[in-house]
Amino acid sequence: MRSLLEYSQLIKKHYEGPLRIYGAGIGAYYLARDILNNHKKFTVECFMVSDESVNISGCFGIPVKSFDECQQGKEIPVIVGTLEWLHEEIVHLLVQYGFENIFVLKDEEYLKIRQKNPDTDADVLFSTHKVLIAEQQLLLNQQQMIFNMQVMAEKLREIEIKLWKNPILFEKNGAYHNESYVKDFKILRENEEFDNMINALVKKLDTESRCEVYRIIHRLHQLCDEKEIFLTKDEEQYTEEMREALDNETFELGNRIVCGKYILPGGIHIEPAVFYYKNGIEQLRYKEKVGKKAIIDAGGYIGDSSLIFSENFDGKIYCFEFEKNNLLSIEDVIEWNGLKNVIPVDMALTDQTGEMEVFIGTVSNCSYNSINNFGRGLEYKKEKVPCITLDDFVYENNLEVGLIKADVEGCEKQLILGAVNTIKEQHPTLMISIYHSIDDLFTIKPLIESIYSEYDMKIFRPVLPYSFIEETLLICEPKC
């Protein structure tokens, strides 16, 4: 789109040839009059309108045509002769229809052209009254449309609140959060121990991890103070690169999804944290220490994390998942991708062995199955499932554990409490989600330090287009 400041240059450059003017109001009339009076070698082919229902006749022998009637000759220059506040919308429309050379008539330029033609009675010559009525009706229609969209948005919001009893909200530039974050953080920041809790969280972390923690806490403050949350320029760049990478390599194939070299069940969400950021594996400094030891994938979902672990480690991967539909998907993922070292385990990992009541999302492939009822999914049903502590599972199977990944919807602390002996004695690498609640963010790291204090720790948050805290990992590695 170019300014009409280039209009005179266009006239000089094109000594003859057609021109189209978008609009059928006073501005378009004056523009046509100026061309006919002052640039006689330059012709006006037609006045263009987007709404064919507006019955307006032309003037000076120049017809009024619809967009459809102007499909031939899209290279012919089009000058937008409407009010300036309409320019953006009209130019967007013209571009959609494929017109190539578009100029805009700014208000001050329109006034200059009008001053060159003071004797023109536009109201009489151009049926301006009819034009104004039509434009007014169009404006009213647009206002009604906006109102209807606002009403629809409110209704959708009400539905969301019903579906997500603890709603997930959207903040500007892609920040999703659980409402409990606001409630719990408001209480926590008033606690006299708040500064000490921050110090405990960043203690012994590297500089990058400290900055990540401070950034999360700053954004939590903004969230509580009802301020907008913006991505940094680097985050915006990473997000764009991630989207482009996943979009380019993901497609549906029958009832399956192909994501790069991976084959997955249809109807699932491709998790960027898994398939772009590789579950944080690239953040490991001592990856070789895992070696061929067993890997515990707690919160297996459909086996996506196990799929990534399988191509990076040679040891057996025990994929824990208690929801039946997800277990079927895990079996499919194992078969479709030819995985030889992934073993599904139909149990929940927690701080007790036996049987326990869980909350199962009624949506197939729901990733919010949980020991706790967070109210974060659609409808839940209660169900009893077998459970075991990791210590018992390791003892019964005589395992040497190299890595524990835990993303169990806020039950990470129970899992850790059931793995105390394994952590104390074997010092496996830990990749623990700490984003499900404010309590997890501040207390999981001190809990692990109380069990084994010699870990090298870092906090990694994959840059995602929808959150400033989701998928945040605490990575604990045994020192060399």
Image: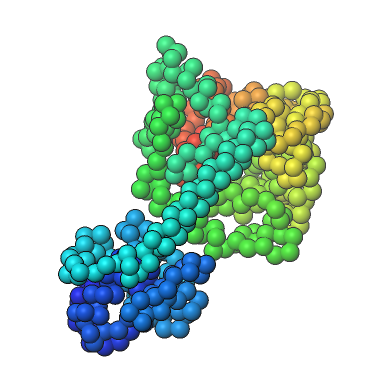
Q: Where is residue 231 in the image (x, y as percent from the top left)?
A: 40, 43
Q: In this view, does 111 lie to the left or right of 476?
A: left
Q: Where is residue 127 in the image (x, y as percent from the top left)?
A: 38, 67
Q: Is residue 357 left or right of residue 300?
A: right
Q: Which residue is farthest front?
A: 124
Q: Which residue is drawn at 41% across and 26% down?
A: 225
Q: Which residue is drawn at 81% across and 26% down?
A: 355
> Which of 193 and 7 lies nearest the eye of the viewer?
7
Residue 94 visible? The answer is yes
Q: Is residue 178 shown above or below 466?
A: above
Q: Position of residue 247 (x, y in %)?
A: 55, 60
Q: In this view, does 270 lie to the left or right of 103?
A: right
Q: Report the colour scheme.
A: rainbow
Res 9 → quadrant? bottom left
> Which of 251 and 67 lies nearest the eye of the viewer?
67
Q: Which residue is drawn at 70% across and 27% down?
A: 373
Q: Where is residue 443 in the image (x, y as percent from the top left)?
A: 53, 22
Q: Which residue is drawn at 30% across and 87% down?
A: 17
Residue 448 visible? The answer is no
Q: Is residue 465 shown above or below 421?
A: below
**Quadrant including the N terminus:** bottom left
Q: Which residue is farthest top?
A: 192
Q: How many labels does the image show?
A: 0
